[in-house]
Amino acid sequence: MENACRYGGLQIMHVVPRSQLGLGIEQNGALGCIGHHGILDNGNRGLRGEMQAMLEDYMQGMYPGWSREAVTYSKYGKKQVWEAPGGSRNTQDNMDGISFLEEIV
């Protein structure tokens, strides 16, 4: 996403906002400029739905099997494992909402 932003001031945009129990993990965030972050958070100019769909498509391309449910806290959820580019994987146990990054050997 960072290559699509030309307005400067990069920030982390949560796909599922923390206010909606989105987890603070790599698979729930992308870098975006201040302008795009404003569109995503505030729905500026009525473009929030389009921005959200583009961001979710981007995340599905980065993390095969990605879903909104997988990055949303669930006390009694099931375990998710994502293969990340660069030889690591993120194992998240939704039972406690904690995420661990481990290197694939």
Image: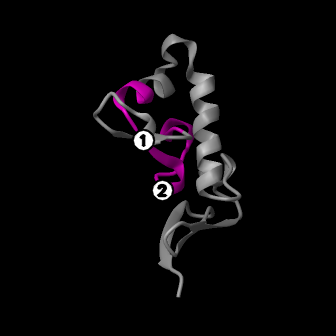
Magenta stretch?
A: 17-37
Distance CA(mark 1)–CA(mark 2): 18 Å
Residue at x 46% of width, y 45% of height: 30
Residue 79, x across and y down, in percent: 67, 67
Q: Quadrant of residue 36?
A: top left
Q: In the image shown, does 97 or 70 lie closer to the viewer?
A: 70
- Residue 3, numbered circle: 1
- Residue 26, numbered circle: 2
Callout 2: SS = helix
Residue at the far top in the pictured view: 45
Q: In the image shown, does 53 or 92 lie closer to the viewer?
A: 53
Along the horizontal axis of the image, is 10 left or right of 100? left
Q: In the image shown, does 9 or 101 lie closer to the viewer?
A: 9
Residue at x 62% of width, y 61% of height: 94
Q: Is residue 87 visible?
A: yes
Q: Is residue 99 above or below residue 32?
A: below
